[in-house]
Amino acid sequence: MEGTPQMADITLSAADVLAVKTVKTVEQISLIAGEAINGGQPVYINTTTGRVYRARGNAAGTAGAIGLCGRTVATGEACTIIQQGLVDLGTALNAVNYGTVVYLSDTATGVFGDAAGTVSVVIGRVVPAHALGNTAERLLRVNL
């Protein structure tokens, strides 16, 4: 689309997935995974199966993110979904400025972006890791 700014993806690496942990959870729910999902990836509920899948911001059907998967799960396993709280995503946010709004990406499933996608879905905001006693690292304040 002409004139549409390109957004940068914020992708979790294998090392980040191992580091994903909830620092403080305000709200969470457990649902069954309809596919393999890595810890930290945003998910939506499939309206036909009732299972959760990796969310993507390029179409309304997959952009209804309800939270982040709390740990890596296989198809058919229970997935604890963090809907509100502070989440440590390892080094994934280290290059992102404090206060940056994190969106659901258009480009791939289960990926964050630093700009709104076709369907604008705000996942949260980057905050300092004071809760961990470390101001150099960043946390994602999830609010879905």
Image: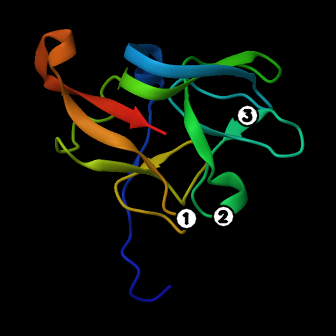
The image quadrant of residue 43 is top right
x and y percent of residue 95 in the render? 21, 41
Q: Is residue 4 above or below residue 103?
A: below
Between residue 9 and residue 104, name the one nearer to us: 104
Q: Position of residue 105 (x, y in %)?
A: 49, 54
Instruction: State which tag comes first along the sequence, 2 or 1.
Output: 2
Question: Who is closer to the viewer here, 135 or 25?
Answer: 25
Residue 83 to residue 66: above or below: above
Q: Residue at x 79, y 43 (%)?
A: 46
Q: Which residue is mark 3?
A: 52
Q: Which mark is residue 119?
A: 1
Question: Residue 127 location, x and y as percent?
Answer: 21, 33
Residue at mark 3 to residue at mark 2: CA–CA distance? 16 Å
Q: Amino acid at mark 2?
A: Ala
Evaluate if marks 3 and 2 touch, with contact meaning CB atoms under 8 Å apart: no
Q: Amino acid at mark 1?
A: Val
Mark 3 or mark 2, which has the lower sequence index? 3
Q: Are marks 2 and 1 in contact (CB under 8 Å)?
A: yes
Viewer can see residue 28: yes
